[in-house]
Amino acid sequence: MRKVLAFTYAIVLASLASCGPRPVDGLPFVDATGIARSVLAENPEGATNLDAGRPSVRYLMDGAISSKAGLDLAIVVDTDASFVISIFSAANDRESLATWTFDFSVSGFREYRMPLAPGITFQAMELSIQDGTFAEIRKLAIKPSFIGFDAKGAEGVPVLSKGIIPRYEEASLPVELRLPSPEIADWYLSVRVGTRSKVTIGARQSFAADLIADRPLSLAAEALGGGPITITAPSGIARVALVPGSVAPVSDLHAILAIPAGRSPYALYRWDLLPDTLVFDFIDYDTQDLYLKRLAFFAEKPDFKGRLAPDSRIASLHAWNAHDYPPWTLAAFFELARTTLFPLNQQERELQDLLVRFGILERGADGSLREGRGGIISISRESASWLRRSFMDHEASHALFFQDSAYRELTTRLWKSQGAESRWFWLTHLGWRTYDTRDEYLVINELQAYLVQQSTEEARAYYRDNVTPRLEAAYPDLKERFEASQGLVLDRIDADARMLDDYLRASWNLRAGSFGRVRAVP
């Protein structure tokens, strides 16, 4: 009798267990905290595989899933079909909260990404195939937002967000990607190639570049002028992402030059190769002076260096048409102003706040300011277009000098090995430009900047036909010495410029006279 009762009880339990949703074996759902939760289904056997006999499946989450800003729903799947994903508030809802369709395929498993609206809560998900024969679902997850394509994401498979359309040829990497128009002006586009490749990036404005695998390119989205984006690279595209810029989008420097002027006092960017570098593009020289003139005198001008000059002392004096400052100089300037209660203007106080926000300055618990990382450079819209490019390249070389110790060491060796006439020429040249030539660090820094602000092919002619005649006019009593030493000086300029250019090409995929990597194309 006991055996009969036990058998009957087992049948009842099995019957009860077959009612309602049960866990799907081998299908984890990883929530935003990284915890793996169960995925349930009314008929869990084979619920990870769709085909003609079972073209759709509804999953139930083990508890409601609430989303916040900056999160995606991610699904790892292999399919040859148009793949449709819908989410629902509750298990039996028929009206979805959101539906996404991926109507292109990539051979093998891939990870589809769908942006979740902030505040959305769902507990059910339906997956279905159309115009295809199968789908195998491997994993579900909530992940940080990603818009773009990644040939090998965290799951070891390609990642494709909604709206991205790849085109493949023979290779494993796509040779073309099409992206939707960025939603916000301060977004930027990041592109990485698999191997060295010519790349074209086009929307209303197009750019071309020659990229290497370990130096991705970024463009401020506003440089592209709006509209859908097409990227082509014959050797294959490894990764593309559209990223919110958070006030200062990351961008190639020459792409910044192509952006139309706005109405704000300045536009703010970060250099894609050294993103701790803030790039200011001021509306005009007067506005630039409000932010940086006093700093220029504090940092580099003879008889003013290390002192905070009142407006009355510098009002009639010229600072620079473009600027560059490392974090230690910025920290010294603002900390001296703080400890001496020097009255900075509104724009300088705004600059200080920006520097703290981006980590170029760090504020102590007592309010003190110390150096952080990176640096700043600036140009102005008031400069002619050819000057804007020259200034941008010149100032960018300073940002590189601040942050690349090997580049500093190379330039220092070049300065230390200068002959007497070359050293005299440079000190005279930089003194004429009103740099404090008693500061050897400043001299070495300006040496490299004036050598690489133009191409190596142009360097000799620039100093022979432009700089030297101006120096002779400024110092007529030195004319004979300029003439006598010219051949030796120009030979050394040519050799030094080429050495710096070799380093830029090998280490940064840059070259003298081109600290941006893109060129605008029709």
Image: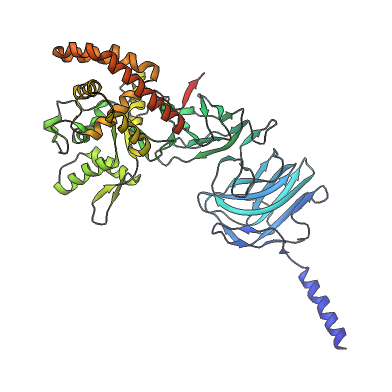
For this view, does 248 lie left or right of residue 2? left
Q: Position of residue 312 (x, y in %)?
A: 11, 32
Q: Position of residue 473 (x, y in %)?
A: 18, 12
Of 499 and 303, the residue lying toward us = 499
| Residue at the image position 35 percent from the left and 18 percent from the top | 459
> Does residue 13 appear in the picture of this structure?
yes
- Number of labels in the image equals 0
Q: How is the image coloured?
A: rainbow
For this view, does 453 lie left or right of residue 9? left
Residue 43 position (above or below residue 383)? below
**Quadrant placement of the N terminus:** bottom right
Q: Position of residue 343 (x, y in %)?
A: 16, 42
For this view, does 38 lie left or right of residue 421? right
Of 21 and 357, the residue lying toward us = 357
| Residue at the image position 72 percent from the left and 55 percent from the top | 58
| Residue at the image position 56 percent from the left and 30 percent from the top | 196
> Does residue 282 appear in the picture of this structure?
no
Image-quadrant location for residue 23: bottom right
Residue 450 position (above or below residue 131)? above
Residue 29 position (above or below residue 304)? below
| Residue at the image position 43 percent from the left and 37 percent from the top | 249
Of 186 and 270, the residue lying toward us = 270
Q: Position of residue 322 (x, y in %)?
A: 29, 27
Which residue appears farthest toward the bottom when viewing the image?
A: 1
